[in-house]
């Protein structure tokens, strides 16, 4: 797990598992040692800037700038747990305006991290998390189908991560059949085409199919468990009757 890196075409997102493990350990021990999360946050930000400025990276566990970014998110998540239910519509709107304005003025993404983008990237991500929590609170107020769908998707996020790239291949097969393309085009990664609304089709395939697989797996697992439990119960009942 510690040496996972790079991309594999069927499980492209697994590279960050080692990052999550190492960054969570860094965050945990720093908060335990320094007692106050804000002090631990300041230390991690300093180390992140240091690693970014000198372009430092430990290749054994792939510890680098992304590791410290993930550590920041762990600590801010811990700090947010007490306020998430107090985020209202006004906080959500302000967070949205902040994310929009900073994103337009200071373009940054995960692949181009350096000393100049480290803080803006973290700021956008953290404030964006507040915006997401606010939107989640609004959705939860109605407790409708959307809330239940998002809850189920969140509970099965690892299944979506695992199977979404393979599910994309079904959408690619649909494009190949509709446009009479070569079957060799199935090898395109991650998608054949993003033209028009095909991104919607890919998104649906990449999210819904893994969720269906997860639902079927969990249903069959519980059915097997129920049958085994029934045998034990009825077996005990038969023994007691004798």
Image (cartoon, rainbow, N blue to C red):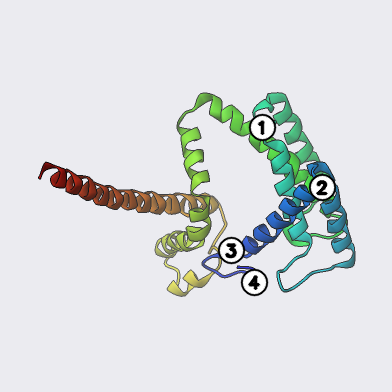
Measured along the vertical axis of the image, is residue 59 above or below residue 11? below
Measured along the vertical axis of the image, is residue 135 above or below residue 218? above
x 75%, y 48%: residue: 32
Looking at the image, residue 82 sits to the left or right of residue 122; the answer is left
Say which residue label 2 marks: 34
Measured along the vertical axis of the image, is residue 187 above or below residue 80? below
- Please report whichever mark, 2 or 1, sits nearer to the chain's N-terminal start: 2
- Please report whichever mark, 3 or 2, sits nearer to the chain's N-terminal start: 3
Say which residue label 1 marks: 84
x 64%, y 68%: residue: 2
Mark 4 and mark 2: span between their CA atoms?
29 Å
Residue 20: assigned label: none
**Badge 1: few (under 14), some or many (20 or more) residues near its Cα, within 10 Å?**
some
**Residue 98 in view:** yes
Mark 3 and mark 2: span between their CA atoms?
31 Å
The quadrant in which residue 189 appears is: bottom right
**Residue 103 in view:** no
- Please report whichever mark, 3 or 1, sits nearer to the chain's N-terminal start: 3
x 54%, y 63%: residue: 191
Q: Position of residue 130 (x, y in %)?
A: 70, 36
Say which residue label 4 marks: 3
x 47%, y 29%: residue: 144
Q: Nearer the viewer, residue 70 or 113?
A: 70
- Please report whichever mark, 4 or 2, sits nearer to the chain's N-terminal start: 4
Say which residue label 3 marks: 14
């Amino acid at each position: 797990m510690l040496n996972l890196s790079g991309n594999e075409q069927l499980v492209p997102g697994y590279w960050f598992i080692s990052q999550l493990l190492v960054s969570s350990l860094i965050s945990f021990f720093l908060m335990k040692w320094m007692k106050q999360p804000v002090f631990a946050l300041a230390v991690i930000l300093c180390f992140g800037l240091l690693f970014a400025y000198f372009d430092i990276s430990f290749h054994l566990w792939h510890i680098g700038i992304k590791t410290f970014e993930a550590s920041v998110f762990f600590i801010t998540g811990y700090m947010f747990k007490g306020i998430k239910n107090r985020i209202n519509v006004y906080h959500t709107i302000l967070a949205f305006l902040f994310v929009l304005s900073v994103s337009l003025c200071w373009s940054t993404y995960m692949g181009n991290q350096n000393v100049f983008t480290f803080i803006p990237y973290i700021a956008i991500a953290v404030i964006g998390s507040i915006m997401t929590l606010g939107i989640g609170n609004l959705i939860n107020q109605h407790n409708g189908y959307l809330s239940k769908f998002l809850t189920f998707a969140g509970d099965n996020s690892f299944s979506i991560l695992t199977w979404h790239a393979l599910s994309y291949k079904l959408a690619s097969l649909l494009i190949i059949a509709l446009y009479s393309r070569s079957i060799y085009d199935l090898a395109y990664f991650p998608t054949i085409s993003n033209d028009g609304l095909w991104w919607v089709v890919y998104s649906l395939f990449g999210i819904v199919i893994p969720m269906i697989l997860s639902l079927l797996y969990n249903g069959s697992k519980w059915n097997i468990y129920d049958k085994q439990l029934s045998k034990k119960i009825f077996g005990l009942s038969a023994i007691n009757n004798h």
